[in-house]
Image: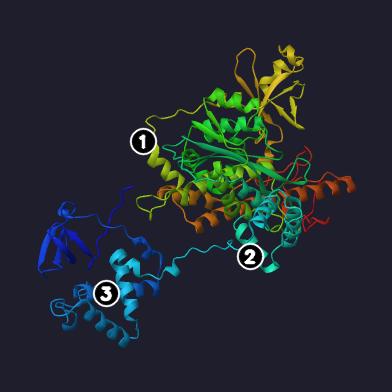
Amino acid sequence: MHKIRNLQLGTVVRLTTGNHTLAGVNGGLLKFRNVDTGEYSVTPISEMPLMLEEPLEALAVEPRDLDKVSGQGRADAEFLALHIQEVLVGRRTDGSEDEPREEYDPKRTSLSQRMTAKTVELASLGNGISMRTLRRRIADYRTSGTAGLVDQRKLRKPKPLAKLDARVLEALRIVIAREKNASSGSVERITENLREELLRRFPGEGVAVPPHTSLWRYINILTKGQYTFGNAANRRSKANAPDRMFESRPAIMPGHEVQIDSSPFDIMVLNGTGKPKRAVLTIMVDKATRSIIATSVVMKASKGVDHALLLAKAVVPRPLRPGGEHFTKYELPVMPWAKLLEPEEAAQYETAQPFIVPQRIMTDNGSDYVSTVFRAACEQLGFDITESSTYTPTDKAIVERTFGSIKTMFAQHLPGFTGGTVTNRGTNPAADEGLLDIYTLSELFDRWVTLVWQNRPHEGLRDPIEPSIVHTPNSMYMAMFELTGYVPIPLTADDYISLMPVKYITIQADGITLDYRRYDSVLLHPYRLLKSSDAAHNGKWAVHYDPYNPGAVWVMDPFTELWIECSWMNGDAFSKPFSRHIRTEAKRILEDMGMTGDSSMLRLTQDVLASTRAARTQMDDEAERNKVAEQRNELSGMPAPVLMSAAEATDETAYEVHGTAATPIDERDFDIHGTTGNKAVSS
């Protein structure tokens, strides 16, 4: 092995011209003093290998040892090094003296005389050492430089397990390893298990268990960072991490690697029967830009068919997806500012979302990802699949970390937030007022991703050259877009429908019934009560539906081969208005380079949720008034006016009284407790 040899000031070397002492250094020139004649000479450092009579000895102490100590230990070594330099060459290298002091001048004094003078000087400075110690320290300096003067006791590596019996150490490691999949216990349990393990592995040897204090110290050392006595989920996750150096897999452009995973959403929502239940969230995250390119929120554990539709979301941008208008078309008319908003302005929030086509998808080994449906969808779309190592969440670290960010940035502001863990859960989050339904939660999350996540600086996108610059997913996408070399073209709405899950249902006289919802279209007239040509499914019709949006279903017309969109007959349930401030703030963010800070992110999230709660309150009030009016009608036998919502009314005074014309009624003329106001009511 070839090592670089160091030459310290004051070191005596044997050159071709005799023994010389290194007296000074100036750039690439070395100043030597002949030990025998006292004459000085200057030699270029490049000629040193040719002038050395014998090779230099390797340093006994690594020069980097000086970097291993700090504070007073380093200061003491550097202080003593200056004084030893003065003893050896007559001057200190710190430039504090131009000429040698008389008692240290090599031309007038011997080395022994200079050492004697130095011991006296150090004693006067409060650092007295003996002549013998000084001689030893000079020898250390000559071989190792300033690093040789460091107190070696400060460099000793601690060996906390050195006194532990090897047999106890072996048994203790085994006992701790068994705690991986067990419920979290205490030190006492490990102690008892250790005694049993010692008797089993070393019978008759009488191996003693260390005292409690010492054993606790040994256990702390062996379980550091393993959550042995903490969270069981964290313990298993840590144990599954690969015991190797983590290697980076850089994503060179958008879509190069997309990570997908599912996790229970930390939110309670209302299911179809009105009961609270925890939702399941699945997201696809692009590694290069940290963009969330597709999402899904479902009530049950995700299946392969759910992920197949998620892939369709990734390749069909939101404005092109059929059925998306079922939210917006009911939202815009009830908002007063919507009349002044151009359709292009309303759509720019969705079009600003990056369109990223995955090339390689990183999944885990769950049954939903190895299913035939999911793999067939990937093959159809041309996506490569890479499976992560079993029980190794670090292979998908980005998507795993994104779930944590969603919890703190979005989920905790929603009613029904579960806290993420049992220890953080409230008394009864399922009893929170204003629990969302699954469709509203899905819509809110999609809008939050577009509005907040994509425009918020991401720590994982910090510029490696200029660390002060932190990109957002949108800005990183724009910066990397030129690297792709091509522009991906989204699939069409027909492609999206064809990738939807299918149920085989008959077409009745009143349309199609799916999941207790009725769908109908005038284009279904020729096929009502008729069987399809699909004999494999007993003549039932293939109905394509979006499990995340019940606004419509689609049936293929067998003659025109065009999709027939059948609308939900109770689609006004999507009437969920959102505040004007959200649109205005989003427009400002897009104009300001698409960036937002934490305070803006929190405000926008709260505004989205506050507007939803206000809409729900308005709808509940209207339903309560209609209910009271119907009850009054049943008790009196008189037809009562039914109040209509603002979205349904074409004129603010036009109301319907059970199909007959009536005098315009002002809502304030009614008392919801069953009594009339000041005005007379005519039937």
- Which type of secondary structure does the marked residue at label 1 adopt? helix
- Which type of secondary structure does the marked residue at label 3 adopt? helix
- Quadrant of the drawing holding the C terminus: top right
Q: Which residue is mark 1?
A: 482
- Label whose residue precedes the other's in the sequence (2 or 3): 3
- Residue 417 is at least partly visible in this image: no
- Which type of secondary structure does the marked residue at label 2 adopt? helix
How far is disc 3 from disc 1 in space, using C-alphas? Answer: 62 Å
- Label whose residue precedes the other's in the sequence (2 or 1): 2
Badge 3 density bin: few <14, some 14–19, many ≥20, Cα 10 Å = many
Q: Is residue 466 left or right of residue 394?
A: left
Q: Are marks 2 and 1 in contact (CB under 8 Å)?
A: no
Q: x, y percentage for residue 541?
A: 71, 19
Q: Which mark is residue 217?
A: 2
How far is disc 2 from disc 3 in space, using C-alphas? Answer: 44 Å
Q: Is residue 38 left or right of residue 569?
A: left
Q: x, y percentage for residue 674?
A: 84, 55
What residue occupies the far bottom of the structure in this picture? 124
Image position of 516 with respect to 178: above or below: above
Q: x, y percentage for residue 543?
A: 69, 23
Q: Which residue is mark 3?
A: 84
Q: x, y percentage for residue 643?
A: 73, 46
Closer-to-camera residue (428/205): 205
- Label whose residue precedes the other's in the sequence (3 or 1): 3
Closer-to-camera residue (620/410): 410
